[in-house]
Amino acid sequence: MTGAPGTGKSTLVAALAKAWRAEGKTVGILAVDPTSPFTGGAILGDRIRMRDLSGDAGVFIRSSATRGALGGLAAVTLDQARALDAVGFDLVLIETVGAGQNEVAIARMAQTTVVVEAPGLGDEVQAIKAGILEIADVLVVNKADRPGATQTVRALRTMIETGHPALKTRWMHHGQMVGVDDRGVSNNHDPAVWIPPIVETVAADGKGVDLLISKIEEHQRYLEGAGLRDQIERARLEAELMDRLQASLLRRLLGGLPENALAEAVASVQKRINTPDQAIEALILQAEALPVES
Ligand SMILES: Nc1nc2c(ncn2[C@@H]2O[C@H](COP(=O)(O)OP(=O)(O)OP(=O)(O)O)[C@@H](O)[C@H]2O)c(=O)[nH]1
Ligand SMILES: [Mg+2]
């Protein structure tokens, strides 16, 4: 569940969790960096919104206010989600503010990504600015009780009809052009492309939540039916492992170098002594010359 600050993600997550609990399903909820400049100190607010759920052993809630924990946030959240999955939670809901690379990385790892919009946050559809529209499996226009909801729906519909990447993206795969969906997964075996439906909700009073659930479940069935779940999981794990590999190589490299090595590299580029590539090459050579840590 991702979207601009204050669009109603937490309220929606609470409403979804309640509905799934009523069906007897267990629900894990992970809220990532819920403190936004808009709603400020939202962890407390989230606690209040989630209050109806507390004390229920079938619900696990964890908020991580980890602003500033660059790079590690996606990994930590995905590990938490794995843990919840491993202990048998039927559903794991992750709320992120769709505002940074971290959040987008997390959203990309979900089986079903719901992008939440709300009217009245400015002229533009917020998700376009944040670059998260293309990862949406289901689009929600929450706060449908507010003026402007119809225009927001219309704007989203136009965007999907004219330019959803699922409808036009192609990429090279093993030297062949193949049709792909928005996650870069080949779906040339299955011509049916998932076009994100748009659901209007009033999270505050539960309106539209049943329809949202049915769309989320429809998307899950689509993944299953098209045999895409394994393929997508493999592609995402590959991306996740590459990210973690990059981060850990970088940590290892920089950790082994003297403290001022990076500053000196920067200075050498600023003084036009080195090009960036030359400075990087020098850093790598310097790191490789160091004794290997055991
Ligand atoms: N009018 C109206 N207000 C809503 C609706 N859903 C949520 N709100 C209100 O919008 C405010 C923000 O809701 P949250 O659920 O905290 O939004 P959020 O997207 O989780 O916010 P952040 O985590 O801070 O990004 C709260 O005051 C909610 O009560 C709705 O459907 N209609
Ligand atoms: Mg929230």
Image: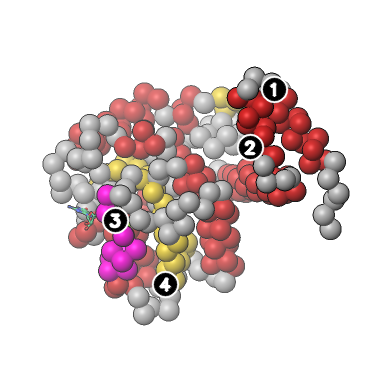
Q: Give the range drawn in magenta.
A: 38-50
Q: Which numbered marker is on residue 40?
A: 3
Instruction: Say which quarter of the image contains residue 99.
Output: top left
Q: Which mark is residue 274?
A: 1
**Number of the front mark, 3 or 4:** 3
Q: Residue at x 57, y 71 (%)?
A: 87
Residue 58, by quadrant, is bottom left
Residue depicted at 68% across the width and 46% down the height = 259
Res 68 label: none
The reply to whether discs 4 and 2 touch (Cβ–Cβ < 8 Å) is no
| Main SS class of the magenta portion in the image | helix
| Mark 3 vs mark 1: in front | 1
Q: Nearer the viewer, mark 2 or mark 3?
A: 2
Q: Could you give the CA–CA distance between mark 3 and mark 1, rounded to whole angstroms?
A: 44 Å
User: Mark 4, mark 2: which one is toward the viewer?
Assistant: 2
| Amino acid type of the residue tagged 4 in the rendering | Val
Decide which of tag 4 and tag 2 comes sooner along the chain.
4
Assess disc 2: are there few (<14), some (14-19) or many (≥20) residues with their C-alpha within 10 Å of its C-alpha: few
First reached walking from the N terminus: tag 3 or tag 1: 3
Q: Mark 3, residues whose alpha carbon is within 10 Å: few (<14), some, or many (≥20)?
A: few
Q: Which of the two residues, 30 or 187, is positioned nearer the viewer here?
A: 30
Whether disc 2's CB lies below 8 Å from ligand 1 is answered: no
| First in sequence: mark 4 vs mark 1 | 4
Q: Which residue is drawn at 53% across and 67% down?
A: 84
Q: Which amino acid does label 1 sit on?
A: Asn
- In the image, residue 293 above or below residue 4: below
Name the residue carrying label 4.
Answer: 59
List the residue tagged with mark 2: 263
The answer, for residue 211, to whether it is visible in the render is: no
